[in-house]
Image (spheres, rainbow, N blue to C red):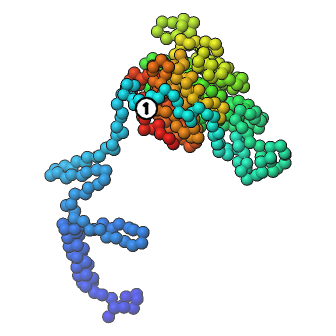
Amino acid sequence: MMMNSTGRPKQPSSSRRATSVLLSCVTTLFFHHATTTNAYSFVPSRNHLQIYQSTTQQQFALPTARHTRASSSSTITMKRPNRRRRTPEIDPTTIKSADLAQELPANLKRKITAKRPTLGHVVPKNSQTRNFRPNEGGSDSSQLRAQGQARDSQRYNNPSNLKILGGSCRGRKLESPTVYLRPMMGKVKEAVYSTFTSFGLYEDVVAGSIKCRTRHLDIFSGSGSVGLESLSRGVRHCTFVDMAEDCCSTCERNIEKCGFDGWNEGGVGSGIGEEGEPVAKVVCADAFRALRQPETVGIDPNAKYDLVTLCPPYEEIVYADLIDAVANSVLVTEDTVILIEYPVELGCLPHAIVREDGGVLVGVRNRKYGRTVIAMYIVNPTGEREDCQSRPEEFITI
């Protein structure tokens, strides 16, 4: 008897062939049965193997698609996500009388104390763990660097890392004044200018047909980062207003650094006088005076602005006075978009603000970003800005 390498009797070749034929038959019958009657799918789980049995002729109802089989072809129909329902056009006459209160809420008539996070150059990170003794030195003292106070320009050249986020000067770094400021955060600025673009403020730039006619008024400009962002995206003109001479000089340097120190030619069809106007203009004056009496600070009262941004120092102003000044300013006109930045400690701005001439400011956005809230209004809306829709549901106490 023949033995294999393991010492066991070697099976005859005929027996091996019979075994192979039998195994092939069993395998064929199994797959034939599986494909005609049932199919098995193995789904791994966390602890064990689950076997799910389903009929191959059954139609599968997926959450994102519906698959239907025809005799000769198959079609797949995808379900689209639900689009957000757009509110109807703004009609000031349909706004509730309660929203058109002549007097602003009491929370806007007082100064507030806005807490600021520990962000190194504004408030030292170790200020909460070390003893605060402002009149003593040593390693145990920690000095709070309040907004508006002078900073060490040799040590902190650009403490806020200001730069332009979009447009022709994207990525350009900006200088900061020699005082500590609270500029608009980068993520807030991106969201804000995305909204401005949807409002059509830079529509002519995107279309490329004619030069953009948007005029921007940047109040409490600081280093000018907000207005320079608009210039980078193609607005025709921007006026920067700040009371600090240091901020105005920094803004002028940033304008020259970005190449916006040119001149807009005037004439017929330009919307400005024959003499023209500069692309960027810096006005060193009080913000309230610039809004109420612009001719006294060198701003043409006949020059209307399509966009007004106000990013004031939270603890140094009364928001009721600021809202009254911008709402009744001669510098705003129909469909002017007004942005107001305020802290969460203030509560919430009203949805509608009545002007002295009977007009109205309608709230179209009120979004919270951390401890910062951005409110946007449109003056006497005519419906020309399609995406500027009234959103009273956003103007609630946050």
Instruction: Answer with left or right where residue 276 lies relative to residue 351.
Output: right
Could you say where residue 151 lies in the image, as x and y percent from the top left?
75, 35
Closer to us: 41 or 106: 106
Say what amino acid the circle numbered 1 marks: Ala
Residue appearing at x 19%, y 68% in the figure: 37
Q: Residue furthest left?
A: 71
Secondary element under disc 1, as helix, strand or loop, is: loop
Q: Residues within 10 Å of mark 1 (few under 14, many from 20)?
A: few
Residue under numbered circle 1:
98
Whether residue 175 appears in this view of the structure is yes
Instruction: Answer with left or right where residue 103 lies relative to residue 249.
Output: left
Tell me if residue 231 comes above or below residue 120 in the rendering: above
How many marks the image carries: the answer is 1
Whether residue 165 appears in this view of the structure is no
Could you say where residue 32 lies in the image, as x and y percent from the top left?
20, 69
Residue 210 position by quadrant: top left
Closer to us: 81 or 3: 81
Could you say where residue 294 lies in the image, as x and y percent from the top left?
60, 15
